[in-house]
Amino acid sequence: MLAKVSVEPPPGECVRAAEQWGRGLRARVAVVARRCHHEQVTRPDLYQELRYRTYSALARGERAPVASSLATTLGFSLAEVREGLERLHAAHALVLDAGTREIRMALPFSNVPTAYRVEAGGRFWNANCAWDSLAIVRLLGLEQARILDLGGPAREGRELAVEDGSLVDRDGVISLPRPASQWWDDIVYT
Amino acid sequence: MTLDQCWALSENWYAGRLGANYERPPAAHFQALLGAVGLTGDAWSLAPPRLG
């Protein structure tokens, strides 16, 4: 049975990238709906839906949907949704929490509060690290934004400004705990 | 890496990430992105320590 999928574009001027993806996905879903009314939706469509639902929520500044919510929304069983999330995790398309197996990251977005935030237009987004903060600005096409590093036990906080789509102050360095080829050995630690 | 390098990388590192048919590019793609901003050698893979 084809899952009924409501695909509405995420609101707001700051989700341009998600909207572009949404337009492409809407076209694809329409084709699938016409062709597959009595056929099972293919797994690749489920994977795309899971990613779309996750990224569109995070791009709106909301939390990513939990697996049970995705199952209800998309009309799949919880087991199928969890299998889909695991496949996406294995492909490094999403990152699941080690314990709950719910979505922890959809890079560059973090689904949990962190020390790194991007603020713009009355919304904010959690980033996984300083680098992902910059990437969120790029991905959402933010023209004006504040990038906040709230600091930590051994690190002072810092604030950066984005004006007219460009990073104003570029002094400083970002430290990463391991070389790039090892980032995904433990992406949460990285 | 410098903040300047990071800003430059941020433009392309996640390019295509929101694409409907996203597939993670191979390692060489990311190595090229790092190399384009001057991050080569240890930035990708630390060389093993030389003994003796």
Image (cartoon, helix red, strand yellow):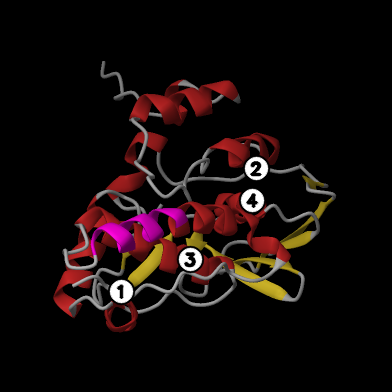
Q: The N terminus of chain B appears in which quarter of the rendering?
A: top right
Q: CA distance from mark 3 to mark 4?
A: 13 Å
Asked if marks 3 and 2 fall on the same chain, the answer is yes
Q: Residue at x 52, y 71 (%)?
A: A8
Mark 4 residue type: Leu
- Side of A179 where A1 appears, left or right: left
Q: Position of residue A129 (x, y in %)?
A: 53, 57
Please give the residue where the numbered disc 2 appears in the rendered image: A173
Kindly identify which residue carries mark 4: A134
Q: Quadrant of residue A96?
A: bottom left
Q: Position of residue A168 (x, y in %)?
A: 83, 47
Type of residue at label 1? Glu
User: Distance of mark 2 from mark 1, alpha carbons?
Assistant: 32 Å
Disc 3: which residue: A110
Give A101 or A154, whichever is nearer the viewer.
A101
Q: Looking at this view, is A156 or A120 the one in front?
A: A120
**Few, some or many C-alpha atoms within 10 Å of disc 3 (few <14, some 14-19, many ≥20)?**
many
Residue A22 screen position, x and y as percent: 51, 59
How far apart marks 4 and 1 lie (CA) works out to: 25 Å
Mark 2 belongs to which amino acid?
A: Val
